[in-house]
Image: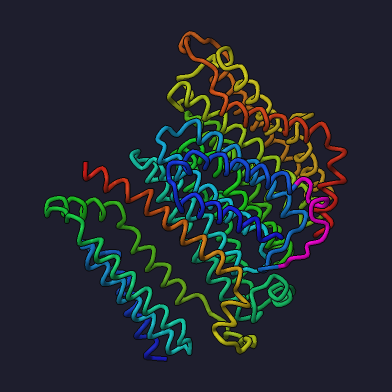
Amino acid sequence: MNIDLLLLTILLACSLWAVLTRSLLMSAIALASVSIILTLLMFRLDAPIAAVFELSVCAGLITVIFVSTISLTKPITRVELKQQTKARIKRYWYLPVIVFALAGLLGFFMVFPEVPSLAALPDLDVKDVLWKLRQTDILGQIVIILAGVFGVVVLLKEKMNHDGE
Amino acid sequence: MSVLFVLVPLLLVMILNACCKKTMSIVASWLAGLYFLYQAGICVFWKSVWPINNLILFNFDIDALSLLMMLSIAIVAFSSLCVGLSTITESRKKFNFINLLLISVAGMNGVVMVRDLFSLYVFLEVTAVSSFILIALNKEIKDSLEGSFKYFVMSAIATVLMLSSIALLLMFAGDTSFESVRDAVQGTNNFYAVLAVGLFMGGLFIKGGLIPFHGWLPDAYSSAPAGVSVLLAGIVTKTTGIYTLIRVVSEIFGFNETIKSILLLLGIISIFVGAFAALLQTDFKRMLAYSSISQVGYIVLALGTGTGLGIAGAIFHLFNHSIFKTQLFVNSAAVEKQTGTTEMGRYGGLSNSMPVTGWTSVIAFLSTAGIPPFSGFWSKLIIIVALWTAGYHTYAALAILGSLITLAYFLYMQRRVFFGKSDKNSGIKEASIGLLIPAIILALITIGVGVFFPYLVDTIIVPISSIF
């Protein structure tokens, strides 16, 4: 239990690091660390296959794509960075306050009842789960991937052409 | 055969992108248009085309409600295609628009056909992802990226809520199919079951843009390209938010006093805040966006009664609203294209130079305000009767009052845009045929549904209310 709590805390810290850091590269690395810790948590929760997927796709593949894309970009200057930081603090100073207030409220006033015993899940092979139980979702996944491809085409490809012109 | 409604658009997208880009970009619009007409046709003649649903591949299932939703999806997608083709000038953008439209339709068809909570979530995401990209199609304009990003963030929050809820429900039911979840959830007072229901409904409120979860909606609608606004306002939020809410609440979670009062309260708040906000808008598309929130309020209010009649009224108003709101957005696209602005203060007397747009818009707004003999009158009548018979007399009275405000802001809009003096806008011509065809078809549907309502009661309303 204590290890899980520690892992969850690190997970939270890494996610905060990913959204707060100014450097895109650092952000990508932080995101990869989030995935790695999530993998550990999944292993501890007896979900080795989900963990392997998380590790290979989210921590591995996606990080590679992020880092290679970031290496093609141009970082902003120090002056711009300072201005952006100031503007952001001015705009969002209340967000951490709200988060801490909510966390405090939840911690002090909410009493969570005992988690009920789990319903029995069918003991099936991964391939059975994917191809028999979750056939429909795979079709949905294919459509999502296609949509993602168009996202890249629409939002990024033409921009590259503009830069090239 | 139901899987075809997802597979065919998917295959079309693949074929369009497989080879001969030049030929494909010419035939793309025809293929997509034909597919939408085919889908609408199948939905209308469903029983005579496929008497038995004999080939059950994948877990798709079609009932009367799914058919009605798919009919609206086909009609709105066809209108959106016509508007997109007439307003987008760049050929590559046109091609991307058609592909994304097909993907979005595949996603929405999936949403209305699945009978499993997790699959529902997957197809909701398909629709959402294609919508983010569609809103940002004109990415040169800063607003459109901002609108898209707002929708993205709010949608991500909705996703988190729904996924957590699905996880909790899986714990209880051991499965995510509608039946098992229903058996596990209904009648229990367990804290986590109630939490799961609350989280899922919260996610759907965000997706449907109900007040106070509406922050993204006016920006997304008004900053998107005209064809995309038509699709978003006409059907995307209706399918992902409202249809799903109706399906999930009436088929899985069931009605109890808390759920009913939440729905009634959110419905009435949305009706009034949406209507008053619409009164204050100066931008044509933003006004329509707030009006959309207000009309969605009626649907949720009707659902809140928890009776068969109320649910049938909600679904009927959902269909009618998707038709006349699409109509109004098509008209706004025509006006925007001919005058180059969406600011209402800069129009005036457009009815003289754009008679078809002007008059179809009159039909749509009269229907929205619930004036007989148009379709909106009947659905609002059913909603108010359902509220009254369920014993919610105050809500029924407030709903009628809300309808008056609807009439007020539409009359104000009509006076500023289409009627009045026309000296500012001399030299403006009627919109192109691509924008007039959907406007005329939609106006005919609005009138037709209103006039032939007694016939439709037996073919649409009764089968749908018998599901619940």
| Dominant secondary structure, magenta | loop
- Residue A106 relative to residue B105: left or right: left
Q: Residue at x 65, y 52 (%)?
A: B265
Q: Horizontally, is B384 left or right of B28 in the view?
A: right
Location of residue B165 (image quadrant)? bottom right
From the top left corner, tell me how far across and down residue B145 is, in percent.
37, 45
Of the 4 image quadrants, the one containing the C terminus of chain B is bottom right
Q: Nearer the viewer, residue B152 or B193?
A: B152
B274 to B345, vertically: above or below:
below
The answer to whether residue B4 is magenta is no
Query: Looking at the picture, does residue A139 appear above or below residue A52?
Result: above
The residue at the point 46 percent across, 84 percent down is A49
- Residue B240 visible from this viewpoint: no
Residue A20: percent from left, percent from top:
27, 64
At a point 68% along the width and 47% down the height, the residue shown is B39
Instruction: Relative to A141, say whether B34 is above or below.
Output: above
Find residue B395 and report its horizontal and vertical position in percent: 73, 46
Q: Position of residue B317 (x, y in %)?
A: 72, 43
Q: Nearer the viewer, residue B383 or B459?
A: B459
Q: Residue at x 74, y 48 (%)?
A: B43
- Identify the residue at the far left of this view: A78
Query: Which segment did they paint magenta?
Result: B44-56
Asked which quadrant contains residue B194, the reply is bottom right
- Is residue B187 visible in the rendered structure shown here? yes
B381 left or right of B340 in image? right
